[in-house]
Image (cartoon, rainbow, N blue to C red):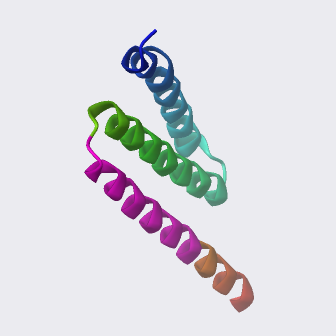
Amino acid sequence: MSLNSYFDYVILPILTLSVILAFIRLYKGPQIFDRVIALDLIITIGIGIITVYSIRSAQEVFLDIAMILALIAFLGTIAFSFYLEKQNNDD
């Protein structure tokens, strides 16, 4: 089994299934914390998909895009947790 067919038949279907499950959690999530974690997971899986595509197409520029997306996702999660902390301190 070549590396490209391994990406096509094993890795990408698993990532697709995990995105679908994360979207279900994002839609159903009973609390805001569940939805934020699901959104963070979707972004992380998207980074994985970008990385797989970068390896498969042998274009390194996509890895830079994945790193920028990871930084933005990290900063968004930190900002949201800071917001929740401030909201709890005000009560």
Name the residue at 54% across, 35% down. 24
Q: Nearer the viewer, residue 65 or 19?
A: 65
The C terminus lies in quadrant: bottom right
Query: Residue 50's x, y, as percent?
Result: 37, 42
Name the residue at 58% across, 74% down. 78
Quadrant of res 58:
top left
Q: Nearer the viewer, residue 32 or 49?
A: 49
Name the residue at 55% across, 39% down. 22
Quadrant of res 4:
top left
- Establish if 49 lies above or below 78: above
Residue 12 included in the magenta stretch of the image: no
The count of marks equals 0
- The stretch in magenta equals 59-80
- Establish if 84 lies above or below 25: below
Name the residue at 26% across, 52% down. 61
- Dominant SS of magenta comes to helix
Query: Residue 29's x, y, as percent?
Result: 62, 46
59 to the left or right of 70: left
Q: Nearer the viewer, residue 72 or 1?
A: 1
Query: Residue 42's x, y, as percent?
Result: 49, 45
Q: Residue furthest bottom?
A: 90
- Establish if 29 lies above or below 75: above
